[in-house]
Image (cartoon, grey):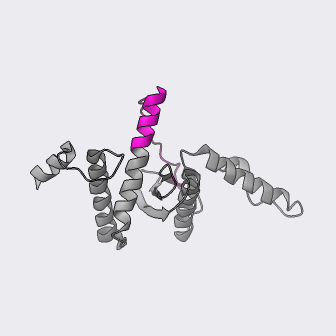
Amino acid sequence: MSKWLSANLRGEFKMGVGRVETTTMFGVMCWMLWKNRNNFIFQHVRSRAKEIPRAAECFTINLCDTTKNNNAAGNFRSSLTKWRPASSGWIKINMDGTANLNGSWSAVGGVLRDSVRNWIEGFQRFIGRGSSMNAELWAIFYGLEMAQSRRYDKVILETDCMTAVEMIKEGLRSTTTTNDDKENKYDATTVC
């Protein structure tokens, strides 16, 4: 087994996934299979088997294209970003969405953690056709839906897509300014 794994990670076998590196695709596929196995064992969540290769391909293509584009543009930089936990009594949801260049596959994922960095729950979904922006917005939606279903009311969202955040803030502004007679339920400046 270890020889087979090593051979695949060295790229000795080709998987026929087109423009992505075979070794990257194999590593992502192993990671997603492991995640789905753990979701089944620990959360009793069963994923459809055919979604795993599609999500792995989408993730791998996006990863390879992003790396290639950043390297070509000369703006790829390696930096360490430290995750910071939420304040006491709060939870933090980190989420992300991705789509391949032609929009034929998109997927989302995220994780909920408490103020002492404990993992609460995670999610990942293949969402089908759509843009990267669509996937980012779905990731935020699924994160909020998960927090709401667990009745968390002190939630911090963390995403890498400022455009999605601005779209949500603008939507909140437009809904709160049309109801001048009622007390504003949302403060759009605190949504981030």
Q: Is residue 113 visible?
A: yes
Taking the magenta stretch, the answer to whether it contains residue 78 is yes
Q: Nearer the viewer, residue 18 or 106?
A: 18
Residue at the spot x=88%, y=59% of the render?
A: 180
Horizontal arrangement in the rendering, residue 5 relative to residue 182 (left or right): left
Look at the image and say whether residue 134 sits in the magenta stretch. Answer: no
Q: Is residue 132 above or below residue 77?
A: below
Residue toward you, 131 or 186: 131
The quarter of the image holding the N terminus is bottom left
Seen in the image, is 56 located left or right of residue 133?
left
User: Residue at point 30% right, 56% down?
Assistant: 29
Q: Which residues are magenta?
A: 64-93
- Residue 90, image quadrant: bottom right
For this orientation, the residue located farthest to the top is 74
Q: Position of residue 37 (x, y in %)?
A: 28, 66
Quarter of the rendering containing residue 79: top left
Q: Position of residue 156 (x, y in %)?
A: 57, 52
What residue appears at the point 47 percent right and 46 percent down from the top-left corner? Answer: 85
State how many labels appear.
0
In front of the other: 155 or 108: 108
Relative image position of residue 139 (x, y in whole percent): 53, 58
47 left or right of 11?
Answer: right
Q: Residue at x 41, y 30 (%)?
A: 78
Where residue 186 appears, as percent x and y from the top left, is 73, 57
Is residue 75 visible in the rendered image? The answer is no
Classify residue 106 as left or right of residue 155: left
